[in-house]
Image (cartoon, grey):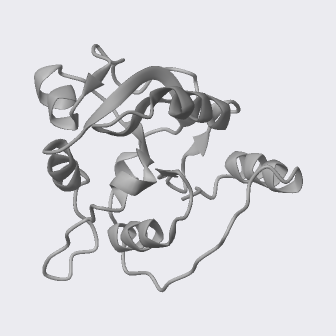
Amino acid sequence: MIGSNDNTKQIIQNLINENKIQIKYYFQENQGKMLAINKICELTTGDVIIDCDSDDYFTKDALKIIKEEFENTRKEGLYGICFLKQNQDGKIDGTSFQGVVSTMFDLYFKQATKGEKVLVYYSDVRKKYKHELENNEKFITEARMYHKIDENYKIKCVNKPVQIGDYRKDRLYK
């Protein structure tokens, strides 16, 4: 999924113009972020799935970094790659990673990792999992799904930023 930030739009538009990527656009009435992610994961045909919120954008070299890591990382038992996120001043959000391969639970609760991170999922694995909403919820924490994936897979952690965005307290789930 691609965010709507102008910088990200320009990067993607350049790749489209150079015939380096193909974009398909899907629309659905607003049913909340998690159902939108579930739907797009069903429709995805590429090798990776990346979330990018509308107020975030990719670094200039993000797609190159992601491609290189993807080509060097694809191994049995992994569900993807976890990258760093930075703010607009270039400061890493939270902390860098201590380990190379982990579960999301271990990252945050055993290694005390802080801040937002960027997950790049291998499509074939990500498609096996959905955000499980109940009672007409429109949002749930991603941690619910991470817990399910952690039961069977691990994620490779890479200390390179691929997204830029500033956490805004007023933006959460309104």
Residue at horizontal 44 percent and vertical 54 percent from the top: 123
Nearer to us in this view, 150 or 1: 150
Establish if 171 lies above or below 76.
Answer: below
Nearer to us in this view, 51 or 75: 75
Which quadrant would the N terminus be assigned to in this image? bottom right
Splitting the image into 4 quarters, where does residue 150 fall? top left
Q: Residue furthest front?
A: 76
Establish if 45 lies above or below 36.
Answer: above
User: Image check: 54 left or right of 64?
Assistant: left
Residue at horizontal 36 percent and vertical 62 percent from the top: 127
Number of numbered discs overlaid on the protein picture: 0
Residue at horizontal 19 percent and vertical 30 percent from the top: 108
Task: Report whether residue 44 is seen.
Answer: yes
Q: Residue furthest bottom?
A: 29
Nearer to us in this view, 34 or 80: 80
- Residue 66 lies, in percent from the top left, at 57, 34
Task: Report whether residue 87 is seen.
Answer: no
- Residue 2 lies, in percent from the top left, at 59, 57
Establish if 112 lies above or below 22.
Answer: above
Which quadrant would the C terminus be assigned to in this image? bottom left
Q: Residue furthest right?
A: 18
Nearer to us in this view, 17 or 58: 17
- Residue 25 lies, in percent from the top left, at 64, 73
User: Image check: 37 left or right of 16?
Assistant: left
- Residue 161 lies, in percent from the top left, at 52, 26
